[in-house]
Amino acid sequence: SAKRVGRNNFTIYSPGLDEHANEFLRLEIRLKQALQSNGLMLFYQPIMDVQSGHLAGVEALVRLRDENGQLRSPNDFIPIAESAGLINQLGEWVAAEACRQHERWREAGLPPLSISINISSSQFRQRTFASHLAEAIDRYGIDPACLQVEITESAVMDNLPAAIAALNEIRSTGIRIALDDFGTGYSSLNYLSSLPLDKLKIDQSFIKKIVSHRPSRSITDAILALGRSLNLKVVGEGIESEQAMDYLREHGCDQAQGYLFSHPLPPKDFEAWYWNRARQ
Ligand code: C2E
Ligand code: CA
Ligand code: CA
Ligand code: CA
């Protein structure tokens, strides 16, 4: 280790950095194993229709089981998947697993739910991405309108012409597209009308402060107005309080998602949540 070799030569390596590198490597190794051996899971978070209060769909959120059996958040391992060249493989697994789950739920008697999956920028720049999605849909006999992809505003802004081409290809298969974390990506508004979109998801940072912070309300209002004029559905996410929900309802937001309704759940728990609500 750096300590044994001597302080003078390696003063730059603090224990903190060392640990960080170790953690990174361990997760990379773990991720490779997980991709081979069912170590990844999808959790599902309900998305509610604001006006009716009914379930509108679910968002699939990936989890990694680490070597201690702990579930790790994608914020810990998606960046590693990207830098280790594993993101495409991970993305294909996510798409296939979401479609498989859709089929299982239909067999369990649930109505055909709309499932959203997240894709990262490197993944959707990959040329074969749209055809992989179409394949997964075919294999499990899913109505393409039941599948949505969520791509962040900043990923789209990275390379706008390439993004427009990729999104057009995805959308031509009937899959819907949501722009995630909207309001944080430094976009000019005139590009929005040239993107093939179905939904805007207001970034959580605005929703968090919607009660306490006037500028966050103004930004939320502007996004809602923009959505209306471009004929896009608008989703508020990160909703934790009734007050935030009231605000969105009164201001014409279409859909809502957050801990107020449910945390992301493993498939069985989501099913229980679903039947429990249906009984009420
Ligand atoms: P995101 O797409 O913006 O997903 C929303 C995140 O907010 C999720 O975190 C969710 O658990 C969390 N969340 C939902 N409601 C609330 C709430 O009321 N309060 C708070 N504080 N948080 C809430 P998660 O599951 O840790 O995912 C983090 C990010 O990782 C996602 O952000 C998404 O960008 C990325 N991600 C998740 N799954 C995938 C995937 O399959 N592929 C790729 N490429 N990225 C993924
Ligand atoms: Ca998302
Ligand atoms: Ca988001
Ligand atoms: Ca995010």
Image (cartoon, rainbow, N blue to C red):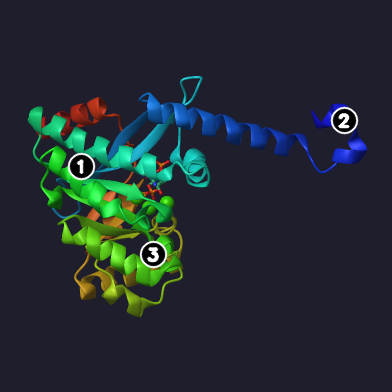
| Closer-to-camera residue (40/208) | 40
Q: Is residue 157 visible?
A: yes
At 28% from the left and 75% from the top, the residue drawn is 194
Q: Quadrant of residue 197?
A: bottom left
Q: Amino acid at mark 3?
A: Val
Mark 1 packing: few (<14 Cα in 10 Å), some, or many (20+)? many
Q: Earlier in the sequence, mark 1 or mark 3?
A: 1
**Element assignment for label 2:** helix
Q: Is residue 5 above or below residue 86?
A: above
Of labels 1 and 3, the one closer to you = 1
**Image location of residue 93, percent across then percent down:** 32, 37
Q: Is residue 234 above or below residue 75?
A: below
What is the C-alpha distance between the residues marked 2 and 3?
46 Å
**Element assignment for label 3:** helix
**Image location of residue 207, percent across then percent down:** 38, 56
What is the C-alpha distance between the residues marked 1 and 3?
24 Å
**Image location of residue 44, percent across then percent down:** 28, 37
